Image (tube, rainbow, N blue to C red):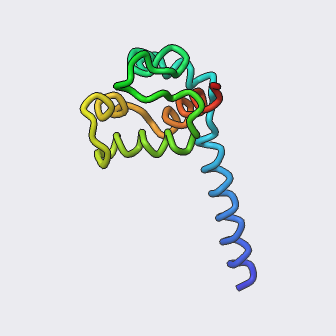
Amino acid sequence: MKQALTLIVASCVLLIAATGQAFAADATAGQAKSATCIACHGVNGISPTETYPNLAGQKQSYMVKQMKAFKNGSRKDPTMNAMVTALSEQDMQDIAAYYSQMK
């Protein structure tokens, strides 16, 4: 019984550690992945028009949440729904990390 409990706890710890590693955000990779974002959200994350939001300095978790909502269709915008379709979880984390570190 004690061995089984130890095995379960160890498995949970490894799973949590592996999940955290898999989605460690990379702002440098996010910069490269954000090339298509520039048209609407600006070169430095500041939108050239009032139509689109500024992304510079937004919280990373907030941006990931919004991208996921566009991707799963719970948030509707034809442009953004299409833009995030091909993004993976890692892509979203990286892009959000890039914009969140801007001032």
The spot of residue 9 in percent (x, y) is 70, 70
28 up-or-down from 93: above or below: above
Name above or below for residue 39 compared with residue 50: above
| Quarter of the image where one finds residue 11 | bottom right
Looking at the picture, does residue 21 appear above or below residue 32? below
Horizontal relation, residue 42 to residue 25: left or right: left
The residue closer to the viewer here, 66 or 10, is: 66
Number of marks in the rendered image:
0
Identify the image quadrant of the C terminus.
top right
Q: From this viewpoint, which residue is outermost toward the left?
A: 78
Q: For the point 49% across and 41% down, which residue is it?
A: 64
The image shows residue 46 at horizontal and vertical percentages of: 50, 21
x 37%, y 45%: residue:
69
Whole-percent x, y for residue 30 in the image: 56, 25
Horizontal and vertical percent position of residue 8: 66, 72
**Quadrant of the snapshot with the N terminus:** bottom right
- Observer-nearest of 5 and 28: 28
Q: Give the residue drawn at x 43%, y 42%.
A: 66
Q: Of 35 and 1, which appears nearest the observer?
A: 35
Q: Nearer the viewer, residue 75 or 3?
A: 75
Residue 12, picture quadrant: bottom right
Extreme-bottom residue of the structure: 1
Horizontal side, residue 55 vs residue 86: left or right: right
Residue 72 left/right relative to 6: left
Most distant residue in the front direction: 50
The residue lying at 49 percent from left, 35 percent from top is 92
Quadrant housing residue 52: top left
